[in-house]
Image (cartoon, coloured by chain):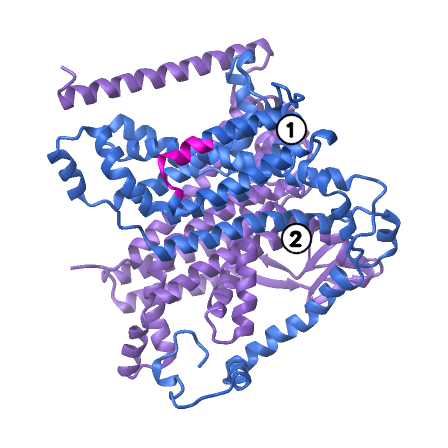
């Protein structure tokens, strides 16, 4: 009977299912028995209780009497904030470094090569701890803060950067949302050819008018040193600055290599062909080289972005409360470890799936359409 | 133009022979863009290099074992690294027994160097490693004539090396099974493999380490509960297996269908087909990617400090706590970073070599 491939396959799979179910059942019964023995209740009800845990810094407003679920949201916001900034900075820097590595200038190519090799071959956690140990050693006290760029000050207390505030009321926010929706809808309709250009123009004009009506005010707030402290601007603590700088240095090394690979993957013949058509350099780059390069780099670039989200957990090494650090505190404080573990798994899978499905959608759009 | 992808029309005519200095000057200042790049990068180097040199060499204390010299100096305190090298490398391992972790480190490094030669990739390699690992665990743990040292006293470089080597060694066979399961025609098997691989790959290693140290005490009976070292090792192994499985799957996908058909025509059953025909070819194709995954794992073992294991970083932190010394943190972490860099940089060059060589014909 077992010699028949189909029967054998069903038999193996049946055995597998029995094994998994049995393993799971054994695990769960032991877990519940262990939890009961320690008197720990199970369930997500604890999320509504006041947490009384301390989150040393947060992007959102958080007070210790806030409930657990708000502490979790605060942690997620911190993680998303770090990841988004690092992705932004390292994409720009990685593009520059990657192209500079291909330069014929030995000084530029060599310096960028050193950066890439150091970033790729050092554990990010060592880099973070090293940078953190430098913070108080290299930087001056707040009164003599370094001013490397206009509006940016670096001192022992952290980085002072220009703050951007967007001033818009609740009604205004609604108008903005509607206007953006109208603009996106008309753009999509036009691309599909279901809307006359005139109608699209009208829709866009309405959207712009809506944005104008919403009366958004951008204001840039520069930090100014007065008395013994900085006023205005936004203050990044040494911990946050270390993570942002360290992870950006690290990720840039990987992005640069991907960009370099992408540029090299577009053959010289493509440039020659563009020139022979009489296109200027800018147009060759924009119309021929970059679209082909994008196809090569989108997916590897995205897996780097996912790595940034994962590496943001290293914030724990310098004591910045990212999502994982917050969850760790919650678990040790509330003893709801099973629920905590499920929340950890759920949040990271959700973040990474969002990123990778966005990349896959974009990748499908720019992929070669074959006949 | 200095753009890397400049067209051939921009290249200088062949008869133009420039001397070395001239050629360099042309590369540095030949075009406006190159001149600008030279100014920017040259400026950066002129600002940073002398300052770093002054700190690291001129004003530094090199070998003076007296902590007072470090307090007086304005530069780096390398004598701290020099004096404390034993503690930095081997952590809290008993002082009189330090020759044991030292031997273990040398053994693992020598074995690694020997194993990366393509000539030693034979079934014998496996036997050598198994024997070596038994010897390594005996040397580290003691027993049978040596003083016993529990894993909680292991520390420093040997912990990093053992975690890397054992995690990858155990994960590799598991990853082959996972890769085969993911390509299987049986839906239950395939789904199980996909769920395992994708959820591990979707999670940060740190969260897996946490889950391993939080959950294992809960779902294992008290008697079976492994120590911290084993828990971290299990987490690292699961992590490595998921990543290696995808690399192996990549190799499997590159095998043409004709190979399977040929094996079927010879009447080979499934496992013999895999063992004799498919896997040797698939793994050979996947070797450069495998080497890259190993570099990632070398770097990742540094995370075990977060779950309280005594790796290089924690032994560095412990050494820094000595109140007699001025706590030269930057120097210590540079030293630790340099060890990791040396390990993974040499492995990266080896991966490059394999990639250039291409998959072997046989």
Q: Is residue A21 above or below residue B112?
A: above
Give the mark, 2 or 1, whose residue is nearer the N terminus: 1
For discs 2 and 1, the disc positioned in front in the rendered view: 2
Tag 1 secondary structure: loop
Nearer-the-camera pick, B119 or B82: B119
Nearer-the-camera pick, A90 or A158: A90
Residue at mark 1: chain = A
Tag 2 secondary structure: helix
Chain coloured blue here: B
Q: Is residue A355 above or below residue A326?
A: below
The image position of residue A92, as x and y in percent, is 51, 63
Name the residue at 62% across, 51% down. Answer: B338
Range of residues picked out in magenta = B120-129
Name the residue at 45% across, 53% down. Answer: A177
Q: Is residue B343 above or below residue A185?
A: above
Q: Colour of chain A?
A: purple
Name the residue at 37% across, 51% down. Answer: A359
Horizontal arrangement in the rendering, residue B245 relative to residue B298 (left or right): left
Name the residue at 17% across, 30% down. Answer: B268
Dominant SS of magenta comes to: helix
Q: Is residue B197 magenta?
A: no
Residue found at the far bottom of this picture: B15
Residue at mark 2: chain = A
Residue A241 numbered tag: 2
**Image quadrant containing the C terminus of chain A:** bottom left
The image position of residue A8, as x and y in percent, is 18, 20
Measured Cα–Cα span from mark 2 to mark 1: 27 Å
- Can the viewer see residue B303? no
The image position of residue B57, as x and y in percent, is 75, 62
**Image quadrant containing the N terminus of chain A:** top left
| Residue A187 location, quadrant | bottom left
* Residue picked out by circle 1: A51
């Amino acid at each position: 009977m077992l010699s028949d491939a189909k029967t054998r396959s069903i038999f193996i799979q049946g055995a597998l299912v029995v094994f998994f179910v049995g393993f799971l059942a054994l695990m769960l019964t032991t877990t519940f028995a262990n939890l009961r023995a320690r008197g720990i209740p199970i369930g997500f009800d604890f999320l509504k209780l006041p947490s009384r845990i301390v989150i040393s810094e947060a992007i959102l407003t958080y007070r210790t009497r806030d409930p657990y679920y708000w502490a979790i949201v605060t942690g997620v916001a911190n993680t998303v904030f770090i990841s988004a900034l690092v992705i932004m900075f390292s994409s720009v820097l990685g593009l520059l470094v990657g192209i500079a590595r291909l330069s014929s200038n030995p000084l530029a190519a060599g310096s960028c090569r050193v950066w890439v090799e150091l970033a790729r071959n050092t554990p990010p956690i060592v880099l973070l701890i090293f940078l953190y140990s430098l913070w108080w050693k290299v930087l001056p006290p707040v009164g003599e803060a370094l001013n490397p760029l206009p509006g940016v000050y670096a001192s022992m207390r952290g980085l002072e950067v220009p703050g951007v505030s967007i001033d818009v009321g609740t009604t205004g926010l609604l108008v903005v949302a509607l206007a953006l929706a109208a603009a996106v809808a008309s753009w999509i309709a036009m691309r599909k050819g279901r809307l006359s250009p005139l109608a699209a123009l009208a829709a866009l004009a309405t959207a712009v008018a809506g944005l104008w009506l919403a009366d958004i005010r951008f204001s840039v707030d520069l930090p100014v040193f007065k008395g013994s402290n900085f006023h205005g601007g936004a203050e990044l603590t040494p911990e946050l600055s270390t993570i942002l700088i360290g992870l950006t240095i690290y990720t840039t090394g990987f992005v640069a290599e991907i960009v370099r690979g992408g540029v090299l993957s577009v053959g010289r013949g493509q440039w020659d062909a563009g020139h022979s058509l009489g296109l200027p350099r800018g147009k060759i780059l924009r119309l021929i080289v970059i679209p082909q390069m994008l196809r090569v780099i989108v997916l590897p670039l995205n897996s780097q972005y996912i790595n940034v989200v994962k590496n943001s957990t290293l914030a724990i090494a310098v004591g910045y409360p990212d999502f994982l650090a917050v969850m760790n505190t919650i678990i040790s404080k509330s003893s709801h470890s099973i629920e905590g573990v499920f929340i950890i798994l759920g949040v990271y899978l959700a973040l990474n799936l969002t990123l990778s499905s966005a990349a896959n959608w974009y990748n499908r759009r720019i992929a070669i359409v074959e006949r | 133009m200095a753009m890397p992808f400049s067209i051939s029309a921009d290249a200088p005519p062949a008869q133009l022979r420039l001397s070395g200095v001239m050629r360099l000057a042309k590369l540095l200042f030949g075009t406006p863009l190159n001149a600008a790049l030279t100014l920017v990068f040259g400026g950066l180097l002129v600002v940073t290099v002398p300052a770093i040199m002054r700190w690291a060499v001129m004003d530094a204390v090199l070998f003076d074992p007296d902590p007072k010299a470090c307090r007086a100096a304005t530069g780096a305190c390398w004598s701290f690294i020099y004096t404390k090298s034993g503690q930095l490398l081997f952590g809290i391992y008993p002082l009189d027994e330090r020759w044991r972790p030292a031997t273990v480190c040398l053994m693992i490094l020598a074995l690694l160097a020997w194993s990366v030669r393509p000539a030693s990739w034979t079934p014998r390699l496996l036997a050598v490693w198994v024997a070596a690992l038994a010897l390594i665990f005996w040397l580290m743990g003691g027993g049978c004539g040596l003083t016993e040292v529990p894993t909680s006293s292991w520390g420093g470089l040997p912990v990093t090396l053992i975690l890397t080597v054992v995690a990858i060694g155990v994960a590799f066979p598991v990853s082959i099974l996972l890769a085969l399961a993911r390509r299987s025609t049986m839906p239950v098997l395939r789904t199980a493999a996909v769920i395992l691989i994708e959820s591990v790959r979707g999670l940060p290693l740190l969260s897996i380490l946490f889950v391993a140290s939080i959950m294992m005490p809960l779902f294992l009976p008290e008697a079976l509960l492994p120590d911290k070292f084993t828990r971290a090792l299990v987490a690292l192994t699961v992590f490595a297996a998921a990543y290696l499985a995808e690399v192996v799957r990549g190799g499997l996908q590159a095998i043409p269908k004709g190979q399977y058909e040929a094996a079927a025509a010879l009447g080979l059953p499934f496992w013999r087909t895999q063992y004799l025909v498919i896997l040797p070819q698939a793994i050979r194709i996947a070797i450069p990617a495998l080497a890259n995954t190993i570099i990632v794992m070398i770097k990742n073992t540094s995370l075990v400090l977060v779950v309280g294991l005594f790796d290089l970083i924690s032994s560095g932190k412990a050494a820094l706590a000595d109140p007699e010394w001025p706590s030269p943190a930057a120097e210590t972490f540079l030293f630790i970073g340099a060890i990791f860099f040396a390990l993974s940089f040499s492995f990266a060059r080896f991966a490059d070599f394999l990639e250039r060589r291409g998959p072997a014909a046989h």
